[in-house]
Amino acid sequence: MTDTKAMAYVNMYGVLGTLENLCQLDGEAQAILAGLKKPVSLCFSVKDGPCCTFHFTREGCRMTEGEEGCSCKMSFSSAEAFNNLIEHSKPGMPTKNPMQVLTFLLGPFTKLTDRLNEILRPSEEAMQERAFFEKSTTLTLYTIAGAISALANHDPISRISADYTVDGDISLGIKDTAYITLRVKDKHFTTIKQRCENPRAIMEFADLDLAAGLFAGKVSTINEMCKGTIYLRGMISMLDNVNRILDRVSVYLG
């Protein structure tokens, strides 16, 4: 079972949060941004839920918490209403600069989210092309990393694991490809899309192929750990708790 409010945080920080990385790594997304006439900072505000602003320029996308600096805003009456934007393309209520909201949402934003969906939910045929495979696997890591913190902070079941996690930084990554820092402080998780400088615990996958197999549930985590292709070091209890939260991520994103 999933929690509607927790799903809203997963959609905001996990799914939409990956727009930052999409615009860094994907040529089609970059071409969409290149057509912007001026920067747009779109805020999604969910009642009793997440509130984040996505700053789009020709150079890329940056997500910040809160509505500060937004040029336009769309509000949602509930977590369920926001989830309907992600799952069924049902918009909320434009509450600031409505014409810019609708023009951008129905144009560049929809093109970007369609491209993101194409990469995160690829066809088997598309995954046969190596460059696409690598891009899809890398972006999936970023989505999962955002979802880990969203669930650790808001999913009732994941909160149990979060409550047992000591403070410190966890390094999560794919060797020589992409790295994430999961920062834990006072039982609260934060995802930082940068390599960890001083990790208290490390979980690293040997390569993209292994990571893709793990993300798709096609290979055994235990077997790979025994073979040493999943590298673990440091405070293992932190990694045990993250693994339990990862089980919940598969439920929400599955």
Image (cartoon, rainbow, N blue to C red):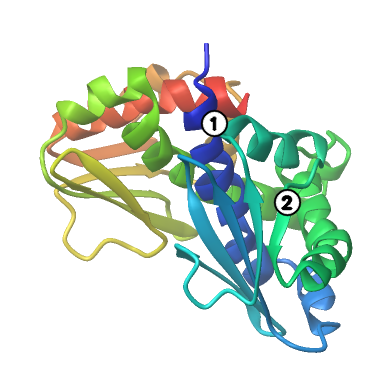
- Left/right placement of residue 140 relative to residue 178 reads right
Residue type pointed to by label 1: Met
- Report helix, strand or loop for mark 1: helix
The foreground one among 39 and 225 is: 39
Residue that mark 2 sits on: 93
Task: Kindly identify the residue that appears in the image at 40 percent across and 18 percent down.
Answer: 223
Task: Kindly identify the residue that appears in the image at 37 percent across and 32 percent down.
Answer: 154
Task: Kindly identify the residue that appears in the image at 55 percent across and 37 percent down.
Answer: 8
Determine the residue located farthest toward the bottom in the rendered image: 37
Relative vertical location of residue 76 with respect to residue 132 in this rendering, above or below: above
Q: Tell me where residue 125 sits by quadrant.
A: top right
Confirm whether residue 208 shows in the render.
no
* Rendering coords of residue 213 (x, y %): 59, 30
Q: Residues within 10 Å of mark 1 (few under 14, many from 20)?
A: many
Confirm whether residue 103 shows in the render.
yes
Task: Name the mark on residue 212.
Answer: none
* Rendering coords of residue 117 (x, y %): 77, 45
The foreground one among 181 and 110 is: 110
The foreground one among 30 and 207 is: 30
Q: CA distance from mark 1 to mark 2?
A: 20 Å
* Rendering coords of residue 77 (x, y %): 61, 39
* Rendering coords of residue 199 (x, y %): 18, 54
Residue that mark 1 sits on: 7
Task: Kindly identify the residue that appears in the image at 83 percent across and 77 percent down.
Answer: 31
Determine the residue located farthest toward the front in the rendered image: 95
Q: Residues within 10 Å of mark 2 (few under 14, many from 20)?
A: some
The foreground one among 101 and 93 is: 93
- Report helix, strand or loop for mark 2: strand
